Image: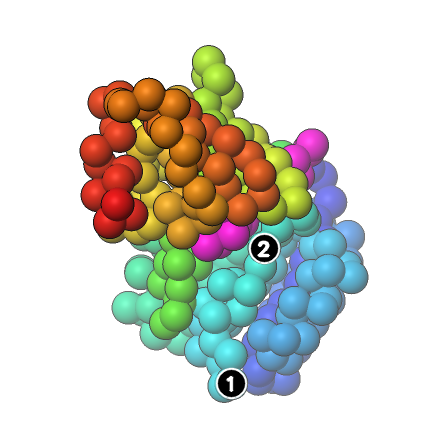
């Protein structure tokens, strides 16, 4: 991608102005927007659809990580964390940020960050996975599930997922109103959701037991699970006891 739309998110006006001036002096920038808080950043991301967001970690009321936890998908930008505290930057980088910058931001490091952002902009799946990793660092967070609908990627809370269903190499995420294509295998999702309300009920199905409306017996060792949206799954003989124990039946 040759031109980048950029959003600077920082509660300090001087910090925003300095970074903006640095960016406007570089090639490859289509436009630069600003936001002074996490809530304002969410509005600007939806309106401007930036390719890249420089996000300050330490902000009052809503930190950068807490703001990221509010992103749920559709248009997802590349995130570069900006901080004056090195320990925060290292945590963010190791969690999946494409890059991080330490204040004060030098022109060489800024150019490197832009080059790296340009490389990842054409890979929305990687962007979504990076944000999902970063969201886990927020003070109150859940492990988000990345799902694809059309050409866009969404970050789903496990609570809104009813089930995962595998057919060949494709895993479908079933929610109340929509279906998404998962970016991970059923086994990887099961491992990711360890100690959650999800249980394997069949080799091709992982179900949120909190979303089970009823269980009907087909045979003495085979059961039919009906979810709150009416979707039905067969419980395999191998998994029947585990499911019944989880439901205290």
Rendered view: 105 above or below 77 = below
Seen in the image, is 231 located left or right of residue 84? Answer: right
State the residue in front, 178 or 241.
Answer: 241
For discs 2 and 1, the disc positioned in front in the rendered view = 2
Q: Position of residue 46 (x, y in %)?
A: 73, 60
Please report the residue visible at 67 percent of the width from the left and 75 percent of the height from the top.
40
Please report the residue visible at 47 percent of the width from the left and 46 percent of the height from the top.
213
Please report the residue visible at 33 percent of the width from the left and 68 percent of the height from the top.
88
Looking at the rendered structure, which numbered label has been put on residue 72?
Answer: 2
SS majority, magenta: strand
Q: Earlier in the sequence, mark 2 or mark 1?
A: 1
Where does the magenta region start and end? Answer: 148-162
Q: Position of residue 104 (x, y in %)?
A: 47, 73
Q: Position of residue 52 (x, y in %)?
A: 62, 54
* 150 drawn magenta: yes
Q: Position of residue 100 (x, y in %)?
A: 43, 58
The mark total stands at 2
Residue position for label 1: 61
User: How far apart are labels 2 and 1 at the CA level?
Assistant: 20 Å
Is disc 2 placed on a helix, strand or loop? loop
Report which quarter residue 8 is drawn in.
bottom right
State the residue in front, 202 or 147.
Answer: 202
* 12 drawn magenta: no
Label 1 crowd (10 A; few <14 / some 14-19 / many >=20): few
């Amino acid at each position: 991608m040759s031109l980048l739309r950029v959003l600077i998110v920082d509660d300090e006006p001087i910090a925003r102005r300095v970074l903006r001036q640095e960016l406007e002096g570089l090639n490859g920038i289509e436009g630069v927007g600003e936001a002074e808080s996490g809530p304002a950043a969410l509005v600007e991301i939806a309106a401007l659809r930036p390719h890249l967001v420089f996000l300050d970690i330490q902000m009052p009321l809503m930190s950068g990580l807490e703001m990221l936890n509010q992103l749920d998908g559709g248009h997802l930008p590349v995130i570069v964390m900006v901080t004056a505290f090195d320990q925060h930057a290292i945590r963010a980088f190791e969690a999946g940020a494409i890059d991080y910058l330490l204040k004060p931001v030098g022109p060489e490091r800024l150019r490197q960050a832009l080059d790296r952002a340009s490389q990842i902009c054409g890979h929305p799946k990687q962007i979504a996975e990076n944000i999902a990793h970063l969201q886990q660092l927020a003070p109150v967070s859940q492990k988000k599930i990345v799902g694809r609908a059309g050409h866009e990627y969404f970050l789903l809370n496990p609570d809104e997922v009813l089930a995962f269903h595998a057919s060949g190499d494709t895993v479908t995420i079933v929610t109340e109103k929509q279906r998404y294509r998962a970016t991970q295998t059923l086994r990887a999702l099961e491992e990711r959701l360890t100690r959650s309300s999800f249980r394997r009920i069949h080799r091709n199905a992982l179900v949120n037991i909190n979303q089970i409306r009823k269980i009907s017996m087909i045979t003495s060792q085979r059961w039919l699970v009906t979810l709150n949206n009416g979707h039905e799954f067969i419980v395999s003989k191998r998994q029947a006891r585990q499911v019944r124990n989880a439901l205290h039946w």
